[in-house]
Amino acid sequence: MLRYTLRRLLGAIPTVLLVIVLAFVLVRAAPGGPFDDERALSPEIEANIARYYNLDEPLPVQFFRYLGGVVQGDLGPSYRYRDSTVSGLIADALPISLRIGGMAMLLAIVAGVGIGIVAALRQNSALDRGVMAFAMLGISVPVFVFAPVFVLLLSVKLQWLPAGWSSTPGLSKYVLPVVSLALPQIAYIARLSRASLIDVLSSDFVRTARAQGLSQASIIRYHALKPAMLPVLSYMGPAIAVVLTGSVVIEEIFGIPGVGQFFVRGAMNRDYTLVLGIVIFYAVLIVLLNLIVDLLYGLIDPRIRNR
Amino acid sequence: MSFFRRPLVLVCLLAAVALAFILYPRLGDQPDLPVDAVVLDRALSSDPESLDPQRARSTQAADVLRDLGEGLAGYSATGELIPAGAVSWTAADDGLSYRFNLRQDARWSNGDSVTAGDYVLGLKRLVDPATAAFYAGQLGAVLNAEAILKGDMPRDALGVEAIDEHTLEIRLERPTPYLVALLTHPSTFPVNAKSLDESGELMTEPGRLVSNGAYVLDQRTANSVVQLRRNENYWNNANTAIDVVRHHVITEEMAELNRFRAGELHITSNVPPDAFEQLKQEYADELRVYPYLGVYYYGFNLTKPPFQDDLPLRQALSMAIDRETLVEKIIGRGELPAYSWVPPGIENYEPAQFSYASLTQSERNSIARSLYAQAGYSEENPLRFELRYNTSDTQQRIALAVQSMWKDVLGAEVTLINEEFQVMLANIREREITQAFRSSWIGDFNDAQNFLGVLEPGAPSNMPGYDNQEYLELLRNASSNMDLERRSLLLKEAERVMLADHPVVPLYFYVSKHLVSTDVMGWGDNLLDYHYSQHLSLKTAE
């Protein structure tokens, strides 16, 4: 398994490199520069700023200078957040995104799988229908609709929870963002695990187990749940990537200083180094998460492990 | 491996990981506030990109810097120019040098005395090419500043000198009647030499930043909050009422409004356009709308047909726009229709106006139609051109309205093109495909020159490519004239000449819009929209 892991990691290097090259070319091809403004700069000032950031060098020179920095873990200075480096910005924002994302994912798994199991066991009952209708709503109503509704209800009207991140040092500020972020995931995971568990419960080995007189509880716990979780697990990889790195919309609505904002802002501001830094970060993250999910697959399903 | 066989174990593991995140000590989190502190919560519409006075650019950064630092002069709550770091100043008779007497009791937050040398350092740092300052042009009138900026002279050649510990002299290339107003801008703030030496580029970090204003930096999180606390060493600390100021970064207007409604903000930076009518009822006492030093305009590319050398056409397009309808029905937040380039309320200045400002709109329309015909266009041969604006609801609403006014009055066929802001700016600058565009100018200081200079031939801000030697001559004469009345007349004549040429179509003058909690005392509406936290206080809760 160690060799497999190493092979996968080495194989990822050319992928990440290609991503860097593409991102560099694309971000530079976009019209406009990081320092353009309605308040146009005089040519001398513009030249001084370009020199300060080495933007007066030929593009290939800039590229290799940048790559040299990346290899040493230096993602360069941000052009917009002028007091910070890109590495520093990501290092500050990442823990916040991870914390919110981690909490949301945990909530999504526990609640989603729980609801899924309950619904599967009471298949076609009123409860099942109600829960699944609710899940459908959770999937189809976008975050930017229900998050502001939460804010209006719980922050503005009832004043139970803060509407903005920076208003309180306490933990109460996590509740709304985490719930908003988790809700669509809960809904999706619930539907996924319900369908999957129903499928497994009607399979031969469960019928055999039942024929041997095992209780429903132990059938589910020892036999049915694990295979039923496979589709959920494979959904988890991309879901974690999305949730952990923060949803841009959630960050915007609650004013959370996470990494998601940097992607949009960086691109709009033509903050070249910030865009590249975030792209590299995402590329590495997705490569790693895919690897972890594949390894977990092996742990859960012996057939894959022994392949 | 059997360890992982039970899904329950896996779930517990995940739970443990998540708990670790929750309990992990305060990563990027703000510290608790001191008990009993008077806290002011105010909003910034974007992240203040730098707290280094010489390297900052945005108005949001300037808002924070005015709390942290202090220049030679400042503004009162209602916008009058007042002494700050200097107690008094005198200009030489020829207007070519100024002497500032600094406040003896001014202290940095680290206890050092604020000296003339600190101001000299700040000003030299501003024009030094190595600083890469955006506002380096601010000192253009100071002796040798332009040569230093170009790299032709060392920064020590700048015409600023510390005569003694508390006397500063600034020598100029040409008289600049608005020099003192320039010196209120954060880019001209002094720099603590010791802090710059010790911390270098890190000098803006909390704990390192040494400031000479009413507040010191307590904590800062990008895209979230800049927290300031009282500077115990500030000379006017006894009169500072607020202990802690939190500048919250809130980019989304609705989110900002919700936080105000939830009682989390005392002052908003803006008001959402869609909620304006409702807020007028709901928050009649809190809503503050006041004229602002900004003009919103449509510009023509004067270097290419159809607008090059076609004055009747440009004038026809300007006259056909019903500005009253535009500000009342389309924008509707108290903006003023613009018939001049310089906003009303500027000190020592009465703006010139379009010759047709006093006509009714239907009179303007009929003249516009004949000018349009004179330019060679008709129903069979309508004018066709593209108008570029940056993607945003407000821009689009205005563009649609103007497009239909041009269609109704003249029959012109205008194609609207919305572009991302940076793309639009690049296109305007290139002057290749751009025909007409939307833009705006927000004043840096309260002087007509700051607006009229925008369209000075050769200036980078002159986006239409306007070129009129008479205008240039009038501006030059005005800028070197120390007689304020004479200067004002020259500037007005310049504005009249420029307006008659119609390089731009000013549409309206901006207003500043805030929701200010009734708990906030000492708030003053002013043209510059500067609201120093040190002027404010909160009604104490009983």
Image (spheres, rainbow, N blue to C red):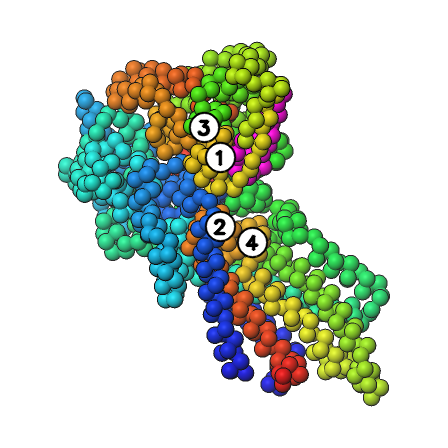
| Residue A3 in the image, given as x and y percentages of width and height | 51, 82
- The residue tagged 2 is A267
- The residue tagged 4 is A248
Question: Do tags 1 and 4 sit on the same chain?
Answer: no
- The residue tagged 3 is B304
Residue type at mark 4 is Val
| Residue A213 in the image, given as x and y percentages of width and height | 83, 87
Asked if labels 1 and 3 touch by Cβ distance under 8 angstroms, the answer is: no
**Mark 2–mark 3 distance (CA, rounded to whole Å):** 31 Å
* B456 part of magenta stretch: no
- The residue tagged 1 is B433
**Mark 1–mark 2 distance (CA, rounded to whole Å):** 23 Å
Task: Specify start and end residues of the magenta stretch as a single range.
Answer: B387-409
* B393 part of magenta stretch: yes
Residue A224 in the image: above or below residue B87: below
Which residue is pictured at 36% across the width and 15% down the height? B493
- The chain holding disc 1 is B
Question: Do tags 3 and 4 sit on the same chain?
Answer: no
Q: Nearer the viewer, mark 4 or mark 2?
A: 2
| Residue B85 in the image, given as x and y percentages of width and height | 27, 37
**Mark 3–mark 4 distance (CA, rounded to whole Å):** 42 Å
Residue type at mark 2 is Ala
Mark 1 lies on a secondary structure that is loop
Q: Quick one: B398 or A68, which is closer to the camera?
A: A68
